[in-house]
Amino acid sequence: MRFAVGERDFLRDGRPVRLLSGALHYFRVHEAQWGHRLALLRAMGLNCVETYVPWNLHEPRPGGFRDVAALGRFLDAVAAAGLLAIVRPGPYICAEWENGGLPCWLTGALGRRVRTGDAEFLRAVANWWRELLPQLTARQCDRGGPVVLVQVENEYGSYGSDTGYLRQLVELLRGLGVTVPLCTSDGPEDHMLTGGSVPGLPATVNFGSGAREAFAVLRRHRPRGPLMCMEFWCGRFAHWGRAADPRPAADAAQALREVLECGASVNVYMAHGGTSFGGWAGANRAGERHDGPLRPAVTSYDYGAPVDERGRPTEKFWRLREVLAPYAEGPLPAPPDPEPVLAAPAGVALSGWAPPDAVLAALGGPEVAAAVPPTFEELGVDRGLVRYRVAVPGPRQPYALRVAGLRDRAVTLVDGVPGPVLAEEDAVLGPVPGPAVVELWVESLGRVNYGPRLGEAKGITGGVLHERQYLHGVSARGLRLDALDGAAGAVAAGGLASGAPRPGARGLHRGTVTVPAGGAGDALLELPGWTRGFAWVGGFPLGRYWSAGPQRALYVPGPVLREGANEVLLLELEGPAGGAGVAGAPRLVP
């Protein structure tokens, strides 16, 4: 098949074609469920699927590539479902994903030089794309595959103006074998389209409403070429500690109808959001300039999408299907049968608990001594936590102890006695007399994925001060979340000396949940009375839980569960609120 960009339309084998696409991120859906979700997209009236590619997921350490072939397997599933594909390989993706998909080992070293024509950044991109792009190029439509369109960067005009950098990415993609059309995507504003588009490439725009006005702006910049909304925002993501903001189905349907009445192609964002498993959810900065307080994204990426987090069609699915049906080639297929669900609630039997120090000693990185607190990036921690220890010399008065540049949240202890949880970037622990030993267990709540503070460091980025004096001589030790992933993580956890269960206490909890024969299926993990941490079931990293809400349970994909005993790990980072209270037994519910 030949796919090209015409004067007014996309062309398939020379004939006009409209892309009716939906976003589905392969990395947010369990692989065993790809086929089911893709069938739902077809049943909604879509002929195409779009996915980002997160660099940091596939190269968590420099040169340490991990399952890059997942993109190829997904594109094969797309072809089997009879859909076309749009791929957005970044290198930056946003996506409410940790660091916008950029590896923290790279942003930590380069700072503001990322997303520019900096030679060191482009070398890293080239190394990454040389590993990734064979999965894409072998599946382009001119080679019999589903890929018809590849996006260069992502919303670059919202971030920078280095158009030479964009041209270098185009040359790199072409040089590495991408032969299908390339495009860019930006907000429908002059400065965004000026900074983010590339002469000779079709530009697309992103919005949730006001299609006619948005396309009028696009036409000022691109008098010719297809109209396309690359991200039609049919819903919204959520942040911890803030109420969700759902979009009514009728409103989304009307806005989509306007897009199609303009003769445009569209990509529904998200058609199926899925889940940011494994603590990969990103964060935003509040305010119009995206430089205010941190707003970490919840684990669920349901997005108010037409197909919900658990793969079920919603009212929005049926309303959008009504809008899309007249544009489909033939009758729409019926939605597939729902995925199996857990037959009955099942409690988690906790069998042991290890305190935080023991977990860190067994699973953490090396202890590092430094004059000033090293950042997460310097310690090689992408997702997880770092314990900082600093001595307050004495004798001296109980001056206020201040933590400058805290990112993002710290559990404190003074001489082993729990203190307040700190959550401000410039945080005050309170009066501390000397001599004393202060511990700060700092957790990253997700790196910023959009705006000028993209790539900012995590940990203690300023210093620890007593009165106005910096306290030098800091020891730090990090724990990466992936130390508990998979079978290796289960073995490592099993090797810890384990005390009696202490539900909800700080530390690592082990347990099992038993699924009866024939009873496995999609479930939710509930943690009544637990405060904040991460969960694994059968070695699969479900992601962060937090009593701050609005998310109250973690989605457990059915393929993760097996009949019989399933191991559960819970890394509780904070303990009961205020150091008191009783946590309930975790449980799986249908």
Image (cartoon, grey):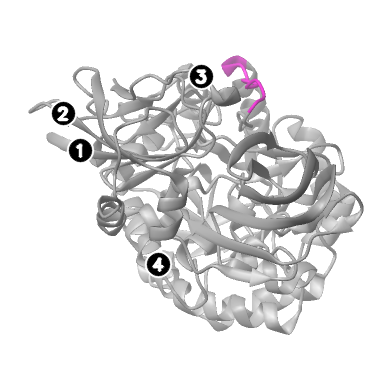
Label the magenta part by its dominant secondary structure: loop
Which numbered disc, 2 or 1, marks the residue that appears first in the sequence?
2
**Tag 3 or tag 2, which sits nearer the N-term?**
3
Residue 258: where, in percent of width, then height?
68, 28
Q: Earlier in the sequence, mark 3 or mark 4?
A: 4
Question: In the rendered image, which residue does mark 3 sit on?
Answer: 319
How crowded is the residue under tag 2: few (<14 C-alpha within 10 Å), some, or many (20+)? many
Query: Marks 2 and 3: CB-CB under 8 Å?
Result: no
Provide the residue designation for mark 1: 566
Please give the label number shown on residue 68.
4
- How much space separates mark 2 and mark 3, taking CA atoms? 37 Å
Looking at the image, residue 387 sits to the left or right of residue 566; the answer is right
Q: Position of residue 388 (x, y in %)?
A: 63, 56
The answer to whether residue 48 is visible is no
C-beta proximity under 8 Å, tags 3 and 1: no
Seen in the picture, residue 245 relative to 9 is either above or below; the reply is: above
Image: 23 above or below 527: below
Q: What amino acid is labelled 2 in the image?
A: Val
- Circle 2 sits on which residue? 515
State the image coordinates of residue 550 (x, y, percent, origin top left): 57, 22
- Relative vertical location of residue 72 with respect to residue 191 in this rendering, above or below: below
User: In the structure shown, which secondary structural element does the residue marked by tag 4 occupy?
Assistant: loop
Element assignment for label 2: strand
